[in-house]
Image (cartoon, rainbow, N blue to C red):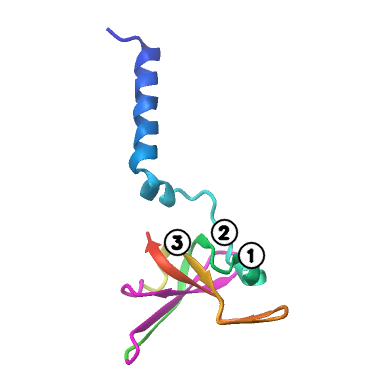
Amino acid sequence: MKTKIERFETAMILLLATLLLGGNSFCDRIPLGLESAKEIMDHPTKWEGKVVRVRGKVTYALKVPLIGMRIYKIEDGTGEIAVLTSEQLPEMGSTLLVKGTVSTALIMGQSNYGTHIRETQRW
């Protein structure tokens, strides 16, 4: 019969193995290490090409039918950032966790135009 300590050790080993072998998608859902919309929008050159995760409420959604472009904005309490997606648009007012790559259409000096996240995952 196993002691409480041995059962605890076994449980911890199983948890660690799960996280290491297949837990990447689970770890992405944990709300740690999130970036703020304000930080990304204020420093677009720092974030250009980097993968980020942002959680926020959907405040705007637009589908451009002729070119198949879908874009929505999320507000995270610090600011708002646009998200480009190839998936169906989320519902207005829903709260999402988004993972994607930061991209900016144009950066001129301290000004940036069209900074957005290209969505790769959404929860």
- Residue 109, position as x, y percentages in the image: 72, 80
Residue 70 is covered by the magenta coloring: yes
Disc 1 to disc 2, how far (Cα)?
7 Å
- Give the labeled residue for mark 2: 35
Image coords of residue 79 (percent x, y): 59, 69
Real-space Cα distance between discs 2 and 3?
10 Å
- Of pointers 2 and 3, the one earlier in the residue sequence: 2
Asked if disc 1 and disc 2 are in contact, CB closer than 8 Å, the reply is yes
**Dot 2: what SS?**
loop
Amino acid carrying label 3: it is Lys
Tell me the element at label 1: helix
Residue nearest the viewer, comparing 114 with 63: 114
Q: Position of residue 11 (x, y in %)?
A: 35, 25
Q: CA distance from mark 1 to mark 3?
A: 15 Å
Look at 34% across and 17% down and name the residue there.
7
Quarter of the image that includes the N terminus: top left
Q: Residue at x 57, y 59 (%)?
A: 35
In the current view of this chain or complex, which residue is farthest to the front?
49
Residue at the outermost top position: 1
**The magenta segment:** 66-90
| Element under disc 3 | strand
Q: Which residue is mark 3?
A: 99
Which residue: 54% across, 63% down? 50
- Estimate how packed mark 3 is, as few (under 14), some (14 to 19) or many (20 or more) residues with alpha carbons within 10 Å: many
61 part of magenta stretch: no
